[in-house]
Amino acid sequence: MEKYDTTEATLQSSSNTAETLLKAGRDLACREFDVQYENGTPFIVHPADIEITRLPELREYPLRIEQNVDTTTAQSFVDYFNRFGNIEDSAIFIDEENAVFKAVFDYHAAGSRPEYHRPGWKQHIAKFKAVKTPEWKSWLENDKKGMNQEVFGQFIENNIAEIQEPSGAEMLEIALSIQAKTEVKFSRATRLDNGQLQIAYNEVTNGTAGINGQLKIPEKFTIGLRLFRGGDAYKIDARLRYRIKDGNLTLWYELIRPHATIDANMDDITNLIMAGIPEGTAVYRGTAN
């Protein structure tokens, strides 16, 4: 009986299958795709599986602006809003807690009647964050922070440009030459029922400054600086404090109501923005995601 070579038959079948696939691929490659348009966006339909591929990058212009811009000054924020914003579709949100101003240009349109309102994509956004200056950061971070005389003197020297009254040079001399001593003053003695005496006293710290003690140590001093980059300069008072404990002198300062100055600065930035944008623009106090 003549034997049938199955190996040769299998190879022949595989070769035929491969040629069939190659021919189908060549036919598909030579077939012209029908390019169609939907609202100006080109798309093609794949003949094999009827799958649609849209090609928005081939449009002459995008359907809408998708952009997230961070401006570095309040004036740039205003200029950008005036170029792309409008009263009907745009809104501004003021986050006072984080000093952030956010404009959403494609927000929800507000018509004269509720049925005319329409949602926006909210994909075109501009933000301005009031960034603290390095000087203001330094004064805030060291507020109420006790320092020895050498460290306090270095701090005053490094930040001498912001000290307004008394002068920075005088404050530096005070910081480096201040001497203090603690005196105990007894006020009264009370005899208790058990025959013991209860003595009341106060510790009083007296300080002098200057080579011959001729400088008066001020109760407070004034600094002047820009709180935020690109903003105006403000004056802030600070109390000068010192104390002796276990023979060691500790000095520090306490800013007086710094939050009030920050609020005033934020109000000035808000007023600048409000004066620069079109009247009637929707402005909200809060945040928007």
Image (cartoon, rainbow, N blue to C red):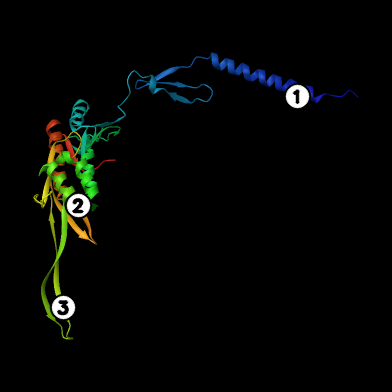
Nearer the viewer's eye, disc 3 or disc 1?
3
Secondary structure under badge 1? helix
Check disc 2 and report its element: helix, strand or loop: strand
Q: Nearer the viewer, mark 2 or mark 1?
A: 2
Q: Position of residue 98 (x, y in %)?
A: 24, 43
Q: Can residue 85 be seen at all in this image of the molecule?
A: no
Judge whether 212 appears above or below 277 on screen.
below
The type of residue carrying mark 1 is Thr
Q: Residue at x 62, y 18 (%)?
A: 22
Q: Amino acid at mark 2?
A: Trp
Of label 3 and label 2, which has the lower sequence position?
A: 3
**Residue carrying label 2:** 252
Closest to the observer: 264 or 77? 264
Distance from disc 3 to disc 2, alpha carbons, whole Å, reads 34 Å
The residue under label 1 is 10
Give the number of the disc on residue 257.
none
Q: At 39% from the left edge and 19% from the top edge, which residue is drawn?
A: 58
Q: In the displayed structure, would residue 218 be above or below residue 233?
A: below
Outermost residue toward the bottom in this view? 194
3D distance between C-alphas at marks 3 and 1:
115 Å
Q: x, y percentage for residue 126?
A: 25, 32
Where does residue 62 sit, x and y in percent of width and height? 33, 23
User: Could you tell me the amino acid type at mark 3?
Assistant: Gln
Disc 3 marks which residue?
A: 198
